[in-house]
Amino acid sequence: MTITNTRRFTLEEYHRLTEIGLFHEDERVELIRGEVMQMAAKVTAHSTCCRNLLRELAKLVGSQAELQCQDPITLPSGSEPEPDFVIARSTDDHYLSAHPSPKDVLLVIEIADSSLNYDQEVKIPLYAEAGIADYWIFNLVAQHLECYSEPYQELTLNFAYRLKRIFLPNQSVIIPYFSDLSLNLSQIFPQITV
């Protein structure tokens, strides 16, 4: 009989492990429900989509909110994921005193290729449980944007989103909380030439 015990870490323990250098600077990890998770390596399509999104979101959002790229947010479930992008409310100290928490987050964005199942099966319930109102997945496998909104708790006690909308690469989408800001998806999805 084999007994497997998973060691769960608090946020404080995770931060301490980072401070003492347990994780290499270029090692991509995040804390999900107390477990240290290795993040998927980025392929070129992911990196291109990330650069495109950074360029376009920075132009659109400007100084109206904080835009962060692959930086942590702190969730009450003992989690500190590092989404590809977060648009958060502006603060005077630009989050020097603490990472954004759910009350600060306006939109979470993940770019998914090899991480698609993880972003759908692990991150959807994680963000919904935290009460994050809007979660987007740039699905590079299917070449569309998945927009999730209206988090809720199911009768089975699992968390999910009530609404899922799909936008194609030739469409535009309004950025939540900014009704005057429209993101042209043709500027985001990597253009594959044959």
Image (cartoon, rainbow, N blue to C red):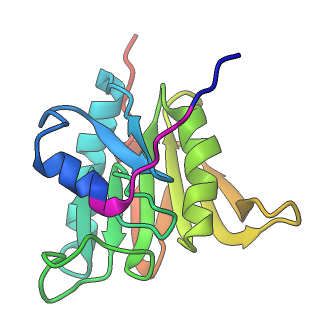
**Quadrant location of the C terminus in the rendered image:** top left
Give the answer, above or below, for where 114 lies relative to 19. Answer: above
Residue at position x 59%, y 30% in the image? 142
Q: Position of residue 64 (x, y in %)?
A: 25, 82
Residue 166: where, in percent of width, then height?
64, 50
Direction from residue 25 to residue 150 in the image, left or right: right
Count every numbered label the image shows and give the total. 0
**Is 53 covered by the magenta stretch?**
no
Q: Quadrant of residue 143?
A: top right
Q: Which residues are magenta?
A: 5-12
- Percent from the top left, x then y, of residue 67? 25, 66
Rendered residue at 73%/71% (across/down): 152
Residue extending furthest toward the top: 194
Q: Residue at x 46, y 41 (%)?
A: 7
Q: Is residue 111 above or below residue 115?
A: below
Q: Verify whether residue 8 appears in magenta.
A: yes
- When the figure is inspected, residue 149 is found, relative to residue 103, above or below; the finding is above
Which residue is pictured at 29% across the width and 52% down the height? 14
The residue sitting at the front extreme is 1
* Secondary structure predominantly adopted by residues drawn in magenta: loop
Q: Nearer the viewer, residue 189 or 25?
A: 25
74 vs 166, nearest the viewer: 74
